[in-house]
Amino acid sequence: MSETISEVPKGMPRYVTVMLGVAVTLGAILLMHQFSGVIGPVFMALNLVIAAYPIHSWLRSKGTPGWLSASVMLLTVVVILLAAVVGLAWAVSSMVTELPKHSAQYFALYNSAIALLHRFGINTTGFSDIMQQISPSSVVNVLTSAFSSAYAVVVVVVTIIASLVFLAMDTPGFRARIRAASGDYPPLGRALVEFTSHVRRYWLTTTIFGAIVATLDGLVLVALGVPLAAVWALLAFLTNYIPNIGFVIGLLPPALLALLGGGWQLALAVVVIYSVLNFVIQAFIQPRIVGETVGIIPTVSFASLLLWGWVLGAIGTLVALPMTLLLKAMLIDTDPKADWVRSLISTDIGKGKASPRTKKRAKAK
């Protein structure tokens, strides 16, 4: 299959084929952007089924009928999904309820900052605009408008659940279909199996690190006396699924409440301790382990976040790396001529499917 696809017709230069491939890829990305409301939830559902597939396999190994094991897997995934949605709604509603209680502290802090700037002869126009954006009333208005658009969230969740139902119905024959699809072209089967394995390990690793980060953040917030520490610990866990920028999203609410409730010293303490914990774990340890787990270098992971966040919207930030893994499996891992691309984006440059020359150079290093 891949040899046929990658063959260059006689008389057509290689660079023309590459340019055509790039054009087709860009066209496909733009098309996916247009239908992101469907593609994003369906691919998210596929990820959830892949992550929960060991439940089905374990039940089948115990003699459970295929339909029953698939139903248990589906129920487990739906419960976890709804729990995540409820947890996120709890965090937002807690913020809406808590912020108005600190309006007096905000205005006192605002007036002190303005007086300090005037003392040094600094124009406060721009500063006033910024402070208005982060005032309790402004933040509450933003969060309230988010609640008002809950219909869009419901549509996404319903689409994911509907996709889960149909994917669960197909789960019992999943392995047979993979074997049939790879009968004429074994590299395709190997690539798909490797893709599902990497996706499963990615979600497992991210969940473990999310639990670690949430626990440490929660203990820090409790020790510092920041309100709603449990809520922000849960938010830190949920935002950990967003690569690279999830930490910032999880930091803003507790830092803002610390600023309003305890002054700039407490806010600074939250930011510093939060940053140290999360930066060490999420910027050094987690990317390396996740990268080794899925075989993708951190730079590609970050670029995936930017690309798929634009293509698929909010869900794209959650499934950015799995989507890149799917493209890698379908376009690179099935094509022997794409070893050079694999060497550039993969962490396993010295092993696996790298070309003999690449292996020799990596071994020499």
Image (tube, grey):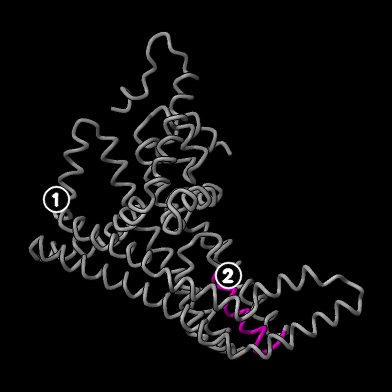
Q: Residue 254 in magenta?
A: yes
Q: Position of residue 360 (x, y in %)?
A: 51, 32
Q: How many marks?
A: 2
Identify the element where label 2 is drawn.
helix
Give 174 or 305, whichever is nearer the viewer.
305
**Quadrant in the picture for the C terminus:** top right
Q: Could you say which disc has been placed on residue 265 in the image?
A: none
Q: As drawn, is 155 to the left or to the right of 319?
A: left
The residue under the point 27% across, 73% down is 79
Q: Position of residue 177 (x, y in %)?
A: 17, 44
Q: Is residue 121 above or below residue 336?
A: below
Q: Is residue 293 above or below residue 92?
A: above
Helix, strand or loop: magenta stretch: helix
The residue under the point 49% across, 50% down is 310
Q: Position of residue 59 (x, y in %)?
A: 15, 66
Q: Residue 27 in magenta?
A: no
The residue under the point 48% across, 24% down is 19
Q: Is residue 259 above or below residue 168?
A: below
Give the magenta part as a residue range.
Answer: 249-263
Q: Which residue is mark 2?
A: 278
Q: Is residue 12 above or below residue 282?
A: above
